[in-house]
Each structure stands twice: as C-alpha cells, then as structure tokens.
Amino acid sequence: LAQPITFLVNPDYDPFSYLDEGHLDGFLVDLIESLESETGIDVEMRPVKFDEALERLQGEGRYCIPSLVFTTQRKALYQWVGPVVITNTYLYTREELSSEFKSLEDVRNANSVGVVGEYYSHKLLEEQGFDNLIIFEDEESLLDALFVGETDLAPFNSAVLQELLKREQASFNPVSTVAIDLDMTYLGFSKDVPSEIVSAFQKALDGLKNSGSFSELYGQWFPGQPVPGIYTFLTEEYPPVTFKGENGEPTGFVTEMVKEILRRNDMFGEILIVPWSIGYELASNLPNVFLFSMDQTEQRRDNFEWIGPVGKNTAYLYARKDTVAPATDLESAKTVAAIGTTTNWWTEQLLKEMGFENLVSSLNPLDTVVQLFEGETDLAVFTDLTVGELVKNAGYRMEELEALIELQTNYFYIAASKGTNFGMILSFQKTLDEMKRDGSFEETIREFVPNMLVTSLLWNSSHLDVKGLRTSMNTLSVGEIATMELQENGSTGYIWDVKITNPNVVSLIYEGSIFERKFLDDSQLVGAPYSVQWVFEAVQPGETVVIFSLRRPWESVHPIQTFAINIIVE
C-alpha cells in the first residue's frame, strides 16, 4: 500500500491539465495534490499523451488517468473515483451553418464531421453509424479545420473549447448545435491499484465535496459552471414533466418536486438536462445518479430504486389524420413499414417486448415527431401527457394527429441508480410522501397541468424493501436493509448516540432527521418534534449489538436512557 500511484496527466487538456513552462498545471493537478494531502498516499504525476496513458492503464502497474470519461465499454476495465468534472459535449459549427443542424438526423446529412481519433466523441459517433467522419490528430487541428471550412461540424467538450479559443486567439466563435454526450469525468485507476487505495481516494473526494473545498477549487477553474456533487441529478427535455425554462433553468412539475425534496433535505444539487439515452445509460451503470422522470416497467423494475410515483401516463400509437389509418390493432401495426420511437424510452422498450421489428429509433423525440409528419414513418409512439408539447415544439399542430392504438398505462417515478445510498433514497421518499400530505405535491402539478387527475398519485407510495428493527432479537440476511426511528425534541437538547459493537457484521449507511411539520393554517408552523432515522445494512454473517443512548451533548457520562438491539446476520 505504501507504493506511490503514478498519475498519467494529459499535457494538452487545458484547463483540466496542461504544461506551463515545463510544469504540470490545471484543475486536475490541483485536485490530485489536495487528494494526496487528504489520503496521505504518495502520488507521482507524469505528463503523458492520452492514447499512451490509456495503453498503460490497461497493462500492469499502479496507474491512474485523472481525466477518464466514464463509458459502459470502459466500466469493467478500470476502477473509478468521482465524478470530478461534468461537462457537455456538443457538435459545433460555423455561424452561417447553424440553422442547418437542429438534430442528429441533420448532422448525418452534413458533408463532413471532424473528430479527434480515439477520443470518446469519435467512438460515440461511430457507434451511431455516422459515415461522414474525418479524423484529426488533435483538437487544435480540428478547430482550425472547422474555422477554414474543411469540415462542417466538430465535437468539443464545452469547457475545453473555451480554453482552446483563448489559447489560439481565434477570431470566430463556433455555435453549438446538438448535445451528443454528458462527459462524466472520473479518476480512472488500473486494476493493479489495491481497492483500499481506490476507496481512500473516493472517501477523500467526498470529504472535499462535503466541506466545500472541492466547490471552491472548481469555481476557480470553471466559474459559473455546475459543480459535480456526490450525487448527480439528470433529466431530459420532456415538457411539461421536465424541460428547460425561458431562463435556461430546468423546470417542469417533476423537476420542481425534486428541487423541493432537495430543499427539505438541506441539500443542493445541479440538475442537468441531457438526451434520455445518455441519462439512462449513466443511471444504469453508475451509483449516486438520480434520473427523472422514469416510467416503471417490468424490464426496468429491478434495475433501479424508485421514488414516487410522481405522475401517470398512457402510451398510444399515433398517425397523421390526412392519411388512411395504416393500422387498426397491434398485429396490423407490426406490418407497417416504419414506426418512430425514441431511444431507450419505455415506449420503445415496450414495443420491442411486444415483438415489433419495424422501429426507427431517434435520440431526440422531436426527430420522431418530424419523421411522422414528413411521412418517413407510418406511426409513432408517444404518451398522452407529453405528445402535445412535443408536436408544438417541433413546429406542427396536434390537430393533425390522432391516437390510433392504446398500448399501456404506467406510473412514473424519480429513479435512483443501484449503489446509491439507500438511506438517501428512503429520506427522499419520506419527503415526497410528506409533500403529498401537505398539499404541495398537487399544487406543483396544477401549476403545469391544471386538469391532471392526481387522486391515485396521492394515495400511492413506493414500498421500498426495508425491514424495521425491533427492540429485541432481529435476524437479517446479508445485503438486507433495516431501519430504526426514534423521536427527539430539539427544545430539550437531548440527542441519540448510536454504537455498533461489531461494524463488520452491520454497518450504518445513513442517519437523518425527519421533521413532523404541523400547520395551523397555510403558513404557520407549530412545534418542532422530529424523528431520527438510522439505516443499517447487513454486511456479513455474524452477530452484533446496536446500542442507543439518549443524552445531552454536555452530559456524555450519564445518558438518561439506553437500550440495545441484538442482530444476527445469516
């Protein structure tokens, strides 16, 4: 464990990392130095080109690339600590061409798209089937080619592009068109690095985030940019549920619910709008990601944790009114030439499960609308809650469509990725249930959808798989989650202490206060009793005792009440 870790730092990735008069500098260099101080682990930093560094990371040795973008293809190859940077990658073009590229379908028809060889953006566009790619050696030459017209578009990380333009003293400002990725950048460790060291770096990074030191450092290098937290909150352009408002800030009735849940839990989190397929992939593979809203289906049920429900919708196959109905039932719909879908939406997954093989999938739901109205598809699948806004935003009229075939009705939720702190998920669900009781849930929905039926939502709550601990003997299985709640009253000054005699058997994964608000009217709050909740996880077989002691902080020797809970883990 005492052996140093070699960080392979990209010298050409300003402002993240770069060479300044022969010395490494940049945000990641400053962060590595802070983490070295926090962990006490020796670190050696070397300037190494990205392609060479990636080759070393896959071989033998204790290496780390501090600027590794997470992908599902890379997930099993390395060990991950982060996120340390979150930025969007856009396809940029010259101002005179900006009106021509509103979607990925438009980009496919471009004369050429420039990419840097082996960069993730190159791989991503290749996977999407683009055959108009021109490969460049580095981002400087790619930017020059875009400027002189050798290529119509080029992908850039938004933060990197701004530094390139400064450094190159460019006389033009490229225009962003289509977002193709959310770059979740991590410290990527090689497999030879002991897991204890990786865990120590993650713990140190989380500590810097909790203390505010990380936010301060991030703001020095990326002023005004969203700061990566311990948790990542992702949503999509899906009005009126979630969308970008007139001021550019995320809004919609579920977005506003998430903001209120965070506020009531004394948390702050940047909410990022991304294409659904990107958010879905990240939430499927990374811990501590909240994605909303997501319909709960049989295919998805076991892959996420669910907070809700926050809404309800019905999926239909739609057709243009000016054509003869191409289908009258599911079997005839399977015989039409093409049905438009949106990638990884539950509606697309449903049609695939039903055996449909005539689907045309688009990353952007507006492309799905355009394809239907322009006759490129015979049918398209949407939900009744959002189809009106999508059609309007694509420049068409809802009166020109008709719902032909009803498919399925689902509740939708705030989804949390597997591996997310389960105590946090429980706290979010309790807060949402509180909002349903005090009227703020319905009020938020009415602001965006005045006539929505909400009764079934008010009486429905996620049943999370949690056991309540009894004040006696308890038996748990490895991996099970159990909770205990005890009431406190802030006016007395008494608090509960918790001690686990054998933390190798059971670990405390969450502790939080739940206020029981009591209103005399719409504004006046009376009383301040609250419950304290502890969430435990059964880690390995054995026996342990959890001891609860009620005391005043200044009376540590003599608690006024003590009791113990016995736990056997099988």
Image (cartoon, rainbow, N blue to C red):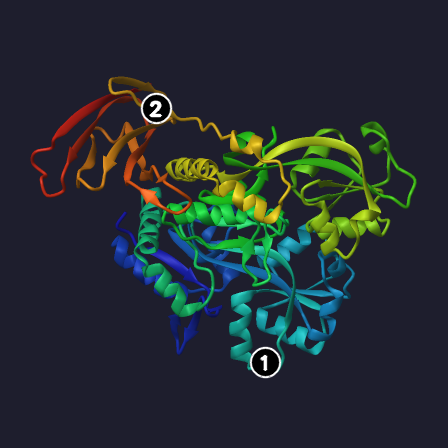
Q: Position of residue 381 (x, y in %)?
A: 75, 40
Residue 188 lies, with reference to residue 484, above or below; the image says below
**Mark 2 or mark 1, which has the lower sequence index?**
1
Determine the secondary structure under disc 2.
strand
Please state the horizontal and vertical placement of residue 49, each as a whole percent of the image.
Answer: 49, 64
Q: Going by the image, does 271 lie left or right of 230?
A: right
Residue found farthest to the left: 557
Mark closer to the observer (2, 1)? 2
In the picture, residue 141 is in which quadrant?
bottom right
| SS state under label 1 | loop
Asked if residue 163 is positioned above or below residue 85 in the image, the reply reads below
- Disc 1 crowd, CA 10 A, few/some/many (<14, 14-19, 20+): few
Extreme-front residue of the structure: 521
126 left or right of 447? Answer: right
Instruction: Please identify the quadrant where the C terminus is shown.
Output: top left
Q: Residue tagged by mark 2?
A: 468
Could you tell me how far apart the alpha carbons at marks 2 and 1 are, in whole angstroms?
A: 62 Å
**92 lies above or below 493:** below
* 118 left or right, relative to 126: left
Residue at 73% over, 64% down: 101
Question: Picture quarter containing residue 209?
Answer: bottom left
Give the class, few, some or many, for how many residues have Cα within 10 Å of label 2's Cα (few <14, many ≥20): few
The amino acid marked with disc number 1 is Ala
Which disc is residue 134 wearing?
A: none
Rendered residue at 53%/49% (across/down): 255
Which is nearer the eye, 533 or 291? 533
Between residue 292 and residue 133, name the one nearer to us.
292
Under mark 2, the amino acid is Gly
Instruction: Tell whether 501 sits left or right of 286.
Output: left
Q: Residue at x 7, y 36 (%)?
A: 557
- According to the picture, the residue beneath numbered tag 1 turns out to be 170
